Image: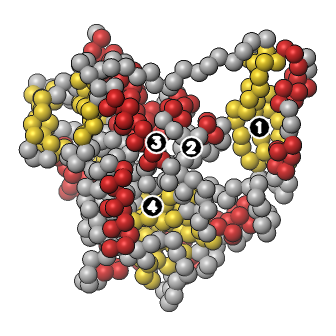
Amino acid sequence: MIQTFDIQIPIEQEAELGNLIELAATELNLKSERIYSCKLVKRSIDARKKEIKVNLRFQVFIDEQEEIESPAFELQDVSKSPEVHLIGSGPAGLFAALELIQLGLKPILFERGKDVKARRRDLAKINKEHIVNPESNYCFGEGGAGTYSDGKLYTRSKKRGDVDRILKGLVQFGAVDAIRIEAHPHIGTNKLPQIIIAIREAIIASGGEVHFNSKLTDLTYKDGKIETICINDKQTIPVSQLILATGHSARDVFELLYKRKIEIQAKPFALGVRVEHPQTLIDKIQYHRADRGELLPPASYKLVKQVDDKGVYSFCMCPGGIIAPCATDKGEIVTNGWSPSKRNNPYANSGIVVPVEENDWLAFKKYGPLAALRFQQDIEQKAYQAVNKGQNESQYAPAQRLLDFVNGKESTDLPECSYFPGVIPARLDQLLPGFIAKRLQKAFVQFGKTMPGYLSNDALIVGVESRTSSPVSIPRNRETLQHSELSNFYPCGEGAGYAGGIVSAAIDGVKVANAIKEKLAN
């Protein structure tokens, strides 16, 4: 028999719990001899009051031993099995490949970018030399956008699939067990690449294929089926089943589908700025104490307010983090945030964004289903122009002190910032579309009331935070997950509009793999 029990204790007492068997016996009113094992399965911190407590959930095995868990993904030799082609090696593509192997199918995966180690050199060039490689950057390359932009694993997508199986899979390939326990699990940009490498090696060892520097440049279809894909304008490959998992920034893929008259749709997304505070300030606000001490992690926050009938909310909050340059082409500025596993940098940053809906991109209506994409692109280019002004191309980002932004004032100087390429004073309140800037200004005032001290001129906003999700969706059948018009084409993950982060994208990859297996079995 398996039972669970919960306790809440001051965080200072967590290290003094002692013998868990005795604790379980006391909590469940049992004799300790009946208990074979007791293990922690969930942990969260409650910092809402001055006395900070920790919530702990334990799983107890009574009158039976704990069974050894099987791996999340049982791998086998699929070298001679039916082939499934995949475009994109982000979490959707990689976990689809793992699931295909478990189901007895051979994944052949094409990634436009480089492997994780080679990617590092291109990221260094963005940060130090301001050179953007459009095929290898923070968004494109092995592991997808999440690999070098944090590895946050929290998701609200529990109804979409088995979240714990995805976390268990990450542990299978090298992540720490704590990600299955913590309420807001996080791997860290410094550790995630090794996990991605382990997944790739497992795919290849099972007979699958992974091809880097291999960009989808064309495709053909006939009688409602994809017939061929073209890689790098050179290699034409017949396909039986095709998974498209290219992420939210693959604009050329959306343009290719539009050009080939494959149905896509403009999709609402969100856009705004990245705000950065000293981490010590956020700690003080959230923990109600001057020094968080050694027991507490760097504090995070989650904010949402209704402003003029639209939500304004925090997105991808990074305690102890760094603001990163995430442009995927020349002539644009894009920001995002990430944290190392220890979250030990001196700054806290978060996207603060406003929804962008159909009425907001009417000026770009002539672009049809690419209208939201063009709206997004236009603002990124304006951010670039605001700091370059005809000079040498750079990845300097426009920035403004937070209070100056709220009050519509120019910042004559700027505080220190984690954004490595550097920031230049600019009027983000004027650069952003009016409906976004005004809502952000009002929301920051409200945030300051919710978190006294948050609205500070020691805080900095950096623009623009524009890649929150895909501005395009690729419609598919709700039951079969096939494209609405092509029976062997499976749009998948964030880029298709069916996920919003590492875990939900991985879940969608698993679902699509199972849909293909079910189709082939019938």
**At label 1, which amino acid type do we have?**
Leu
Query: How far apart, in angstroms, are the residues tagged by discs 3 and 1?
Result: 28 Å
The nearer-to-camera label among 2 and 3 is 3
Q: Quadrant of residue 306?
A: bottom right
The residue at the point 44 percent across, 48 percent down is: 193
- At horizontal 80% and vertical 65% (from top left) the residue drawn is 289
Using the numbered discs, state the Cα–Cα distance from disc 2 to disc 4 in whole angstroms. Answer: 17 Å
The span from disc 2 to disc 3 (Cα, nearest Å) is 17 Å
Residue 98 lies left or right of residue 487; in this view the side is: right
The three-letter code of the residue at mark 3 reads: Ile
The residue at which mark 2 appears reads as 154
Front residue of 184 and 179 = 179
- Say whether disc 4 or disc 1 marks the residue closer to the N-terminus: 1
Residue visible at 57% across and 47% down in the picture: 186
Q: Earlier in the sequence, mark 2 or mark 4?
A: 2
**Res 395 visible:** yes
- Judging from the image, the colouring scheme is secondary structure
Amino acid, disc 4: Asn
User: Mark 4 or 3 closer to N-term?
Assistant: 3
CA gap between label 2 and label 1 equals 18 Å
Q: Is residue 332 visible?
A: no
Residue bearing the label numbered 1: 56
Mark sitting earlier along the chain (2/1): 1
